[in-house]
Image (spheres, grey):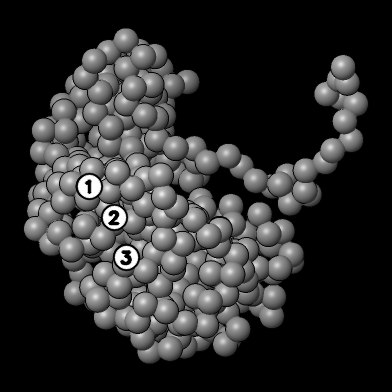
Amino acid sequence: MMRQTEFQVQAREALRNMKPYSPGKPIWEVQKELGIDKVVKLASNENPLGASPKAMEAIVACLPEIHRYPDAGTKALNEVIAAELSVSTEQIIVTNGADELIKLVAEAFLEAGDEVIMPSPTFSEYEFGTYLMGSEPVSVPLNDDYQYDVDRLLQAVTEKTKMLFLCTPNNPTGTYLPKPELRRLLDGLPKHVLVMVDSAYSHFASADDYTDGLEFVRQGYPVIVLQTFSKIFGLAGIRVGFGVSSPEIIHSVLQVKEPFNVNSLAQEAAKAAMTDHEHIGRSRAVNAEGREQLYAAFRRLGLSYTESMTNFILADLGPGAKELYDRLMRRGVIVRYGGAWGLTNHIRVSVGTKEENEFFIEQLSALLAEEEQIPQKPSMPLRGTTDNGNGVPRVISRVVT
Ligand SMILES: *Cc1c(COP(=O)(O)O)cnc(C)c1O
């Protein structure tokens, strides 16, 4: 038997830069590890109402046909999407989750050495696709309030720039790029730069000057819009997303797609979900109320947060954020710690149902109350607090809006 160390097989050079994705912990894992029953997951921006009942029916209805290969061209789903978004079917590519779209676009357009501009912090898959192709990510920081700075993005452009990823509203900050600013950005870019507008959270955005980017596709800009069925449509587990762009750009992406990338259950579910306007409307309303419920709680607790156009909120818990994240987990609340984005004082909490939000608020309030009672050691700094001289911490409240 040959020993592992005797192999001379080398993975590609480009893989050295790639970091593993860190997903939100699944509920079952926390139940098992900690031996607790009640676990609320507010970590992956899923739809707390579940999938559209019509999507679930559609899945059941197509079970007798699952011995057949799915439609490689996702024809029926393309027609539904085209009708809903007023674009043509040649402008659409459906993928195995929108994550696959990011990878396919990278494979279709990036060469080794190309530069790819992306905001920071943002969704980690852009860096993944960039590194995968041996290209160079160029991170452009958001400003102090986590807003986009178009001038900074434009200053990052060089003759090597091939793509720009723009997440609006942005994950994990919840902030967005207003329409006039997106137009200014697109008009300021050289003609050979492809822009991916990731509007995975567009359905939750309520600002009047928000755009999901589709109008710029219709106007002929070199833009590909990313959409997913994992967020408002509640189909994260079955993996389906899509891209919308010019027929030429879509053609190039189709060239690198595996024929049967989207399974038949996903195609049927997505068709039903996209036309279930009642479920979409209810999901949006529950999210809007949940955001207000969480904002109010953060204000009450003296915590600052970033106003969100999405179904999650970035909250500043101060230097004790990691500790609070761990302790929330032990109390059955899974949120996302900001460390992976370099936001070491922050957590990102998904908006759940009213009851789930309340459970999170209760647990966080209890932890903060405990903290105020324990005399604080200087070696263990906690949430944005200062000592006012008598050992009682004073909470600094700065609400970023
Ligand atoms: C969730 C998400 C996606 C896509 O998710 P899939 O489940 O792969 O469809 C894309 N972009 C952002 C910013 C996201 O948060």
- Find residue 61 and name its label: 1
Residue annotated with mark 2: 268
In percent of the image, x 53 and y 41: which residue is there? 21
- Callouts 2 and 1 close, C-beta under 8 Å: yes
Q: Quadrant of residue 92?
A: bottom left
Cβ of mark 1 under 8 Å from ligand 1: the answer is no
Name which quarter of the figure residue 111 lies in: bottom right
Q: Circle 1: is it few (<14), some (14-19), or many (20+) Cα within 10 Å?
A: few
Q: Amino acid at mark 3?
A: Leu
Q: Earlier in the sequence, mark 2 or mark 1?
A: 1
- State which tag comes first along the sequence, 3 or 1: 1
**Residue 260 pos. (x, y %):** 49, 56
**Mark 2 Cα within 10 Å, few/some/many (few <14, many 20+)?**
many
Q: Position of residue 105 (x, y in %)?
A: 55, 66
Q: Are marks 2 and 3 in contact (CB under 8 Å)?
A: no
**Label 3: how many Cα within 10 Å (few below 14, some 14–19, many 20+):** many
- The answer to whether residue 270 is above or below residue 79 is above
Q: Which residue is mark 3?
A: 77
Instruction: Find numbered disc 1 in the image and state the secondary structure of the residue it sits on.
Output: helix
Disc 1 residue type? Ala
Q: Nearer the viewer, mark 2 or mark 1?
A: 1
